[in-house]
Amino acid sequence: MAKARKQKLKVFRTPIGFHDAYVAAPSQKAALEAWGSESNLFAQGAAEQVTDVELIKEPLAQPGVVIRRLRGSAEEQVAALGKAGARKAGKTAAGPRPATSKPIVPRPSRAALDKAEAALEEVEQRHRFKLRELAAEEERLARRRRDLERAYERECAKLKSAIEDERERYERAMARWKK
């Protein structure tokens, strides 16, 4: 009976965000399966075999398990963001960038938009208040106009009545004078 031959494990690495994913596997195909990749990261230049003794210890202790390690300190990562434009397109500190990666862009601030919207709301409220004031003033003026028209009509009616009375007196006086 032949002895089953133990396969020699190799350690492979691929960048995932700010981490590197290491896995100890017998082949590149097995490493891709462990990472859950549907494309060949090795052919794309986004994965590689690792031979550094310090880096392969932990993955070799847990074959088939994906080990994530932070790539650099937080300060180094922030500093690398500033240099991202200076580097050659398609390359990262850990090697070629995967085809699906996008540059990290900070979320835009809403502060200016919120300020502009608040200013517009304030102007609209002030406008509505002024319109209500004008409507009330228009109502007062309309009431004054109606009162003025009524007073004018009463005064004209009195004067027309006085004119009629005076006309009758004049005509009677003229009739007496002519006799």
Image: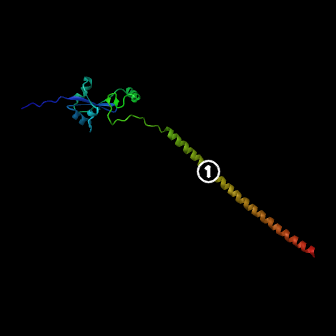
The relative height of residue 168 versus residue 142 in the rendered view (above or below) is below
Position of the C terminus by quadrant: bottom right
Q: Between residues 39 and 80, which one lies in front from this camera angle? A: 39
Q: Between residues 4 and 81, which one lies in front from this camera angle? A: 81
Q: Quadrant of residue 174?
A: bottom right
Asked which secondary structure carries label 1, the reply is helix
Residue lying furthest bottom: 179
Any part of residue 166 in sight: yes
Q: Position of residue 4 (x, y in %)?
A: 11, 31
Residue lying furthest top: 53
Q: Quadrant of residue 152?
A: bottom right
Colour style of the rendered protein structure: rainbow
Position of the N terminus by quadrant: top left
- Local crowd size for mark 1, using a 10 Å CA cut-off: few (<14), some (14–19), many (≥20): few
Residue lying furthest left: 1
Q: Residue at x 26, y 23 (%)?
A: 54
Q: Position of residue 85 (x, y in %)?
A: 40, 30
Q: How many marks?
A: 1
The relative height of residue 124 versus residue 168 in the rendered view (above or below) is above
Any part of residue 61 in sight: no
Q: Identify residue for label 1.
A: 131
- Please state which amino acid type lies under the numbered disc 1: Leu
Q: Position of residue 43 (x, y in %)?
A: 26, 33
Q: Between residues 170 and 40, which one lies in front from this camera angle? A: 40
Horizontal arrangement in the rendering, residue 105 relative to residue 55 (left or right): right
